[in-house]
Image (cartoon, helix red, strand yellow):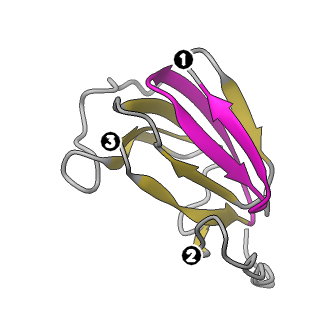
Amino acid sequence: MQSGRLDSVPPRNGDWGPAYIIQGPTSDIGLLTLRPGDAMTNHIHHFCDESFIVIDGDVTLWVECQDTYHLTPGDVYRCKPDEMHYFINESDTTLHMVFIKSPASPGDTINLPWTPGQPTPSIPPAPTGAN
């Protein structure tokens, strides 16, 4: 049994970014906080999917650098392995969103810097023999 609280760990960047609440062995669970104007770097995971549950605020999710979704409180979305995803808070309120990565795959986040209007980055192949 593992337990945690959404307010138990500060975000990675002080007052914004991801904060891992529970890690491994079968999943990682955390809270993403984005202030107005903040963005979470475009990235993929080769070996896990990632689900998102909006607690408060709203955010734009870009998938594969082309499809956009406006997420609001209560929305639940999931990205498959190798599906690029990028979040930007274009609102005037702070976003709090739970994320769940399953299975737990430490080191499986591959940042592919991108912002709307730029060419879609190439996805590097998964390392052989990994996970």
Image vertical order of residue 125 relative to residue 30, above or below: below
Q: Position of residue 90 (x, y in %)?
A: 47, 42
**Disc on res. 51:** none
Q: Residue furthest left?
A: 14
Circle 2 sits on which residue? Answer: 113
Q: Residue at x 71, y 38 (%)?
A: 69
Question: What amino acid type should be assigned to the residue bearing mark 2?
Answer: Pro
Counting residues from the start of the chain, the first of labels 3 and 2 encountered is 3
Counting residues from the start of the chain, the first of labels 1 and 3 encountered is 3
Q: Quadrant of residue 64?
A: bottom right
Quarter holding the C terminus? bottom right
Helix, strand or loop status at disc 3: loop
Measure the alpha-carbon separation of dots 2 and 1.
27 Å
Measure the alpha-carbon separation of dots 1 and 3.
15 Å
Image vertical order of residue 85 relative to residue 110, above or below: above
Relative to the observer, which residue lies in front, 54 or 117? 117
Q: Residue at x 28, y 54 (%)?
A: 12
106 to the left or right of 124: left
93 to the left or right of 48: left
Q: Quadrant of residue 106?
A: bottom right
Q: Residue at x 60, y 41 (%)?
A: 60
**What residue span does the magenta drawing correspond to?**
46-71
Helix, strand or loop status at disc 2: loop
**Disc on res. 73:** 1
Question: What amino acid type should be assigned to the residue bearing mark 3?
Answer: Arg
Asked whether residue 66 is in view, the answer is yes
Majority secondary structure in the magenta region: strand
Q: Residue at x 39, y 24 (%)?
A: 3
Q: What is the crowding at mark 2: few (fewer than 14 residues within 10 Å), some, or many (at least 20)?
A: few
**Disc on res. 35:** 3
99 to the left or right of 3: right
